[in-house]
Amino acid sequence: MRSATISLAILATCLGGCNGGTADAPTKASESSTADARSPDGRRYLAQPLVDEIYTADPSAHVFDGKLYVYPSHDIDAGIADDDLGNQYAMRDYRVLRIDRPGGPVTVGPVALDIKDVPWASQQMWAPDAAYKDGTYYLYFPARDKSKDKNGLGAFRIGVATSKDPMGPFVADPSYIPGSFSMDPAVFTDDDGASYMYFGGIWGGQLQRWKDGVYDPNGSDTDLKQDDAPAISGKVVRMSADMKHFAGPVRDAVILDEQGKPVKGGDHDRRFFEASWVFKRDGKYYYTYSTGDTHFVNYAIGDSPFGPFTYKGHILAPVQGWTSHHSIVQWNGKWWLFYHDTQLSGKNHLRSVKMTELKFNPDGTIPTIDPFVP
Ligand code: FUB
């Protein structure tokens, strides 16, 4: 069991020379290699990685008992070249980050769940999320099951694991959540205590293979190639009281344009790709997501946790690296955006989690954040 604390203050001034670490862990930065770090095209970064001991991605942030916990993917280098199926994202375990106060040190927890302890999973522990209810912490995670599709790969399913400690270790249920499919689970709990899981992703996330409600192992590796039809929607489902089952039908989280029509499949700047995250502010539900191949994090607003949600704009402009995946949480009176980029590695599958303050306009809209500063 390993844990470590890293000072955010040191990180803020030390990351310019963090490249050159070993395959699975970035090299510790030195203070002389500074906040002047530049991207390959010469831009300075808005924020610095929260940790440089391990690579972390897909941050799902939660406040439990006043402390901030981040449930990220734990990126590793399996030596697999980039492809559209996402084979290069070959993660095998999870580790939780904890920050006790804004600007304070970040604790990197020990292994919280290892794929070897998940009986149904074959590979690829992708973007997780967590929830708390009645003294138990729930870790939700996607992984491929043991079936074989036309590429010899399993279908993505969503598992659940529990712990009495938000840092874990978590114990996985022997099977995935019945009826679950695809990836990127995000669980939102409403003011009345009801919880909802948002999930799904196209391309490597396989949502396009579930278009008739049944998995097609020979289906498309990308999307449905129907640019003028309504885009494939992310999914939403109410969770059962035990937080381990779906309590109702899986529904589409539909994104509407300004005319009230579903965003189309060919509208890659606005259509859903992956990385659902929902939060509530002033009685409105903000459905946020990544556009994948156009690299935005977008938001749409609705009046119900089931949607529909009306498209509003970009929250985050493209970061360095192919994927963009985020979460948004209120902590100590401010709203925070957690996101990732490839500052420390320059490689799409070796990412680092960052955080920055998120602001709102008086009308509830969100000014777009540029992950680079002039
Ligand atoms: O980390 C693996 C995958 O990359 C996630 O599930 C996606 O959201 C993307 O960030």
Image (tube, rainbow, N blue to C red):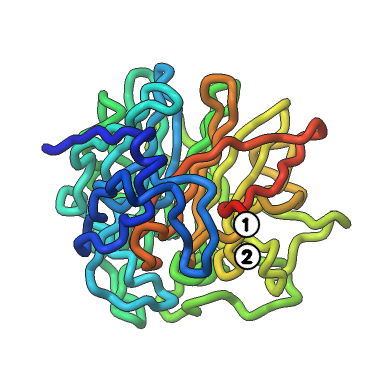
In this rendering, the answer to whether 50 lies above or below 125 is: above
**Quick one: SS at disc 1?**
loop
Q: Nearer the viewer, residue 151 or 218?
A: 151
Q: Which sits earlier in the primary sequence, circle 1 or circle 2?
A: 2
**Quick one: SS at disc 2?**
loop
For the question of whether residue 145 can be seen, the reply is no
In this rendering, the answer to whether 178 lies above or below 182 is: above
Residue 271, position as x, y percentages in the image: 67, 63
Residue beneath the point at 38% across and 46% down: 128
Residue beneath the point at 35% across and 57% down: 344
Numbered label attached to residue 232: 2
Residue beneath the point at 69% across and 65% down: 269
Residue 255, position as x, y percentages in the image: 71, 54
Q: Nearer the viewer, residue 244 or 254?
A: 254
Side of 113 relative to 356 (left or right): left
* Contact, mark 1 vs mark 2 (Cβ under 8 Å): no
Q: Which three-letter amino acid code belongs to the residue tagged 1? A: Ala
Q: Nearer the viewer, mark 1 or mark 2?
A: 1
- Say few, some or many: other residues with alpha carbon within 10 Å of mark 1 (under 14 / 14 to 19 / 20 or more): some
Is the shortest distance between ligand 1 and the CB of mark 2 under 8 Å? Answer: no
Q: Nearer the viewer, residue 209 or 228?
A: 228
Side of 367 relative to 220 (left or right): right
Side of 199 relative to 151 (left or right): right
For the question of whether residue 118 can be seen, the reply is yes
The residue pinned by badge 1 equals 317
Q: Quadrant of residue 283?
A: top right
In this rendering, the answer to whether 217 lies above or below 155 is: below
